[in-house]
Amino acid sequence: MQNKPFPKLVNDRIIKVAKGETPDKLPVWVMRQAGRYLPEYQELRKNNSFFDICQNPELACEATLIPIRRFKVDAAIIFSDILVVPQALGMKVKMVPGVGPVITDPLTVESMTKLNVEGVISRLQYVGDAITLTRHRLNGEVPLFGFAGAPWTLMCYMVEGGTSKTMSKAKKWLYCHPDAATQLMDMLAEIITDYLLMQIKSGAQIVQVFDTCVEHLDRELYSKYGLPQLKRIASNLKSQMKACKIYIKGAHFFVDELDSLGYDVVSIDWTISPGYAGGCLHDKNVTLQGNLDPCALYAPKEKLIEMVERMIADFGTRRLIVNLGHGVYPDTDPEAFKTFVDAVHAVRL
Ligand code: 1CP
């Protein structure tokens, strides 16, 4: 399987747009498109734990393909989670239904030395195997994305032990243990780079870095602790692949500089208005991705279509990959998801 050539890519809209070329139709995909809102996924989850699906390439491939079979999305994203990295570093991560990820022994400054860095990428090889298998099963229909969490977001989950309203434990490191915080994020940046390079080698055609917890920082803290690592990751990836993307939630304080991170595509959340983002980044050689409010999918069909059209008009159709501003919510009606995707493809370029 490893050495067999991959099938030729048929739908390359996203790759084109990521590089600034004009596609035949606006491309669209959705974060968490393989998730809990789909009955096929719930069925798969009945007999398998979340991490069993991630770790078994056949099951991860199956989960990845669910939304591709159902909708006309323009990309597949490998079924996994950002927390497989802390897990491979030796942390115990559980996915608790209705709660989310729970890490039983959160990271402390003292326990940092216990992280099992040696051989971490080989312990994540199952993600590479799932990617290789899925590239073949996709048969070139759409490109396959790989992904990883950004250093700051991974640090948040590792230190907090799960989701948190304030990320105050992780932020405490920034104020009280700045050297340990830098050391941890530098280490994570190196691992993430190697991990994404492994995914690219295994067949990922674009990779996306998720920095979901940026809304808790300000410009000063992010410039010191998040950005240098993100820039390093991008520059190391750039030589190896066609395009890389970053998703940032809560980047209000530096929208006009998002291009400086070095990624081909910047994905923004719904609280940043498309017109403002487009205006700030106009002619800066970056593609925007986003950003409809995931809750807009609860709206009546006509209203949803209207919101999609307005968002696209506000962004402008040049260098745009349409997405939601965050992952699709578990109580979303799959019919609304279809309406969203079809409304994007109906826009004439
Ligand atoms: O019980 C279940 O079945 C778990 C639900 C689930 C799923 C389907 C979780 C728990 N993660 C995932 C998959 C996942 N996570 C993907 C896979 C592919 C796809 O997009 O279809 C991706 C890209 C992620 C990324 C991820 N996980 C992020 C970054 C992006 C984001 O949504 O902010 C974060 C912060 C996580 C942590 C995580 N994993 C799962 C939960 C509930 C959480 C906490 C954050 C949240 O509530 O969304």
Image: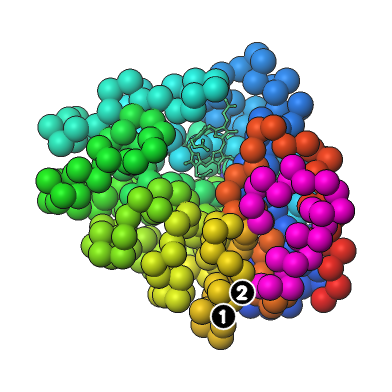
Viewer can see residue 242: no
For residue 190, side relative to residue 19 (left or right): left
Q: Which residues are magenta?
A: 292-315
Q: How is the image coloured?
A: rainbow
Describe residue 242's horizontal placement relative to residue 165 as left or right: right
Return the residue at label 2.
Answer: 275
Q: Tell which quarter ligand 1 is in.
A: top right
Indicate yes or no whether the magenta region holds residue 304.
yes
Q: Quadrant of residue 250?
A: bottom left
Residue bearing the label numbered 1: 279
Residue in the picture at 31% in, 33% down: 160
The dominant secondary structure in magenta is helix
Callout 2, which amino acid? Gly
Q: Quadrant of the N terminus?
A: top right
Please state the horizontal and vertical placement of residue 212, each as a whole percent of the image. 45, 49
Q: Are marks 2 and 1 in contact (CB under 8 Å)?
A: yes
> Residue 232: which quarter of the image?
bottom left
Q: Residues within 10 Å of mark 1 (few under 14, many from 20)?
A: some
Q: Whole-percent x and y of residue 226?
A: 31, 58
Q: 203 and 220: which one is in front?
A: 220
Q: For the residue labelled by badge 2, is the local secondary structure a helix, a strand or a loop?
A: helix
